[in-house]
Amino acid sequence: MEELVIRDADVVDGSGGPSYRADVVIDHGRIVSIVQEAAAAGCQRPKAVRELDAEGLVLSPGFIDMHAHSDLALLRDPDHSAKAAQGVTLEVLGQDGLSYAPVDDRTLAEVRRAITGWNGHGDDVDFDWRSVGEYLDRLDRGIAVNAAYLIPQGTVRALAVGWEDREATPEELDRMRQLVAEGMEQGAVGMSSGLTYTPGMYAKDAELTELCRVVASYGGYYCPHHRSYGAGALQAYEEMVALTREAGCPLHLAHATMNFGVNKGRAPELLTLLDDALAAGADISLDTYPYTPGSTTLVALLPSWASEGGPEEILKRLADEESAELIRHHLEVVGADGCHGVPVEWDTIEISGVTDPGLADFVGRTVRESAALRGEAPWVTARRLLLDDRLGTTILQHVGHEENVRAIMRHPVHTGGSDGILQGAKPHPRAYGTFPQYLGRYVRELGVLSLEECVARLTARPAARLRLPDRGLVREGYRADLVLFDPATVAAGSTFENPRVLPTGIPYVLIDGRFVIEDGRRTDVLAGRAVRRTP
């Protein structure tokens, strides 16, 4: 007898087609039978060792988070309810060009310092890997949800070139090609870049094109955080479209937004650019989170020249009065490339987390508010934080526009990604709320997307981009990575004031046919594994 039958579920199968009522039978981690209500009339209904009454609940494929920063969180936190409770059954790691493989001892230490604000120091993690394959093997020991990995181009450049702002030599470029090829052979699904973060931002288009050719040869895709989401955003999007067309590589645009005052109401221009490229044969997809503010580290706002050489060189420049004044001028007057070419507005920069507990009073306030309390200029406060917190400070940037969020969300190649940073006392609520926010606010309350269309964007379309042949749909033979939610009550519990609150209306989540969320509570099941590229 089969292990489980989910009885009388309203199945939204991920295809975008209409829902239907059915019994879904699961055995050995797979969907083995789907008996629709109409077909069951007059027939004996399927039986199993366990029956789950799903009356009033929607059964959908598990949600795929196309942009996650759980690279260390999955290892240090077996519970990982921040994602599991949302119905996330697969996260894509290695984002924004910086992560922890491939590395050697030198670059591992450098990368750990550079992205402390994203993932913490990692002192509670045993870094017993160096290659992409070894990192994936580490995930295979058991994690809360499944995970795929993108080769981080900035980490590759740090390993082959260093943190200097210069072109790679032919020998260094060959080394980077080799590292990308090895990562793809070991199971990565593609390559990411952080082109407003060092050292990835120092790569010219010709270098990126060569690496994308390697990615494409293995059937992977390129996922850039491109060079600007503010001034010059459209040009930055155009650059990525042209680059990947030249390389013959599929393109997935990370957290595709149009932010800052210069881009208010300009999402249609981006969508026209994408439509024209798609009509010409380009292979493009994108992800967004359903919120207006962004989130990153405070140090990421600095001009690229101030970040050359890595974290220790940044701290030296910040400690030097003359260099610090030049950094301030670029931030406040010129518009630093790290701040997307827009002069920083300190009243939009909210401190969301610090690594030094002695700086906790800054959290939850904007830089301008903290500066006013101290009777000093905002740059003085920001510089103090950068130095005292050793570059580990995370921020929210309140620079987005709701009309842009909704317009991009409606585009046919759209998928969902949380970009969730789990560090800090008050992280962005998207880390805990992205997927129920889509279903509750943007489907039920606002009607921006239909339920069937939204589910497709969170399941089957991401699975297609990842080239996963047996995930993303409720189909016989597919893996039983499934979510049961109440469409009338599903909602994000997390808010900007209280971001670490779990969602409501998602009572059951299964990975590989095993309950990781049952009756709304996290079980002790660690059913997640590394999901490697399908050859």
Image (cartoon, rainbow, N blue to C red):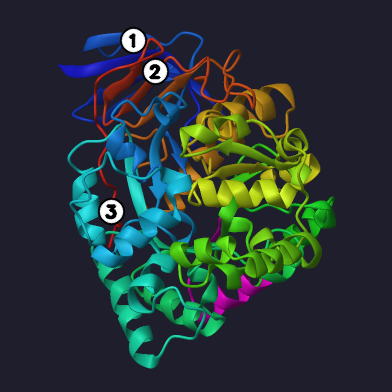
Q: Nearer the viewer, residue 374 or 54?
A: 374
Q: Which residue is mark 3?
A: 532
User: Magenta span covers which residues?
Assistant: 237-254
Up the image or down, 228 lies above or below 411; here it is below
Q: Is residue 64 visible?
A: yes
Which amino acid type corresponds to the residue marked 1 in the rendered image? Leu
Q: Residue at x 77, y 64 (%)?
A: 231
Q: Residue 508 — which label?
A: 2
Q: Residue at x 75, y 67 (%)?
A: 232
Q: Quadrant of residue 361?
A: top right
Which amino acid type corresponds to the residue marked 3 in the rendered image? Arg
Number of residues whose C-alpha sits closer than 10 Å to that of mark 3, classed few (under 14), some (14–19) or many (20 or more): many
Tell me, yes or no, whether the highlighted magenta stretch contains residue 450. no
Where residue 422 sits: x, y (%)?
46, 36
Q: Which residue is mark 1?
A: 52
Left or right: 226 with respect to 346?
left
